[in-house]
Image (cartoon, rainbow, N blue to C red):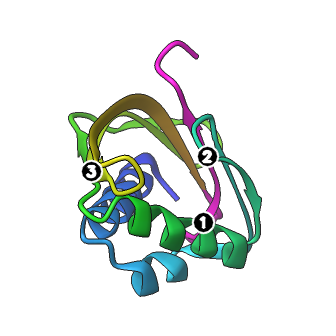
Amino acid sequence: MDTNQSIELAKNYVTLSNDHNLPLIQLLFADDATYHSAYFGEYKSSAAIHTMMASFFVCFPDAHWEVAEYRGIEDNGVEFNFAMTGMDTSSGEQVKRQGLERIYFTPDGLIKHIAVLKPHN
């Protein structure tokens, strides 16, 4: 897989996330995928990641990610800085978070790992 393919896959993931399309998002992950978020913890397996995302979208029903630039990195990876906005239903407060996300793909284009880092990492 080349860098442009990886970047297109990452863009698709962000688009589906902004659409809150959990059924299609779940299809993007390898069964044994892992997800580490500095904000929400560690998840192992596509099923565990899907459950976390479903809970996230309940807590942030209007979550939206802005990404200005996608960069190819090693190991079929893509990284990008993001700004996430949304209303936290548990507190009623508008939230804006910034961070760096890295998505790594299998050779056949499935997500094998996501790392979400806070801006200072």
Q: Residue at x 29, y 55 (%)?
A: 63
Q: CA distance from mark 3 to mark 2?
A: 16 Å
Residue 83 position (above or below residue 77):
above
Q: Secondary structure at mark 2?
A: loop
Q: Eyeballing the image, is 6 above or below 32?
A: above
Q: Is residue 49 magenta?
A: no
- Residue 97 position (above or below residue 85): above
Tell me, yes or no, whether the two marked residues, 2 and 1, touch with CB atoms within 8 Å.
Answer: yes
Span of residues in magenta? 105-121
Q: Which residue is mark 2?
A: 40
Residue annotated with mark 3: 87
Q: Nearer the viewer, residue 34 or 9?
A: 34
Could you tell me which residue is drawn at 26 percent across and 49 percent down? Answer: 86
Q: Nearer the viewer, residue 104 or 108?
A: 104
In reply to whether residue 113 is colored magenta, the answer given is yes
User: Taking 112 as reference, is 57 left or right?
Assistant: left
What residue would you read off at disc 1? 52
Q: Are marks 3 and 2 in contact (CB under 8 Å)?
A: no
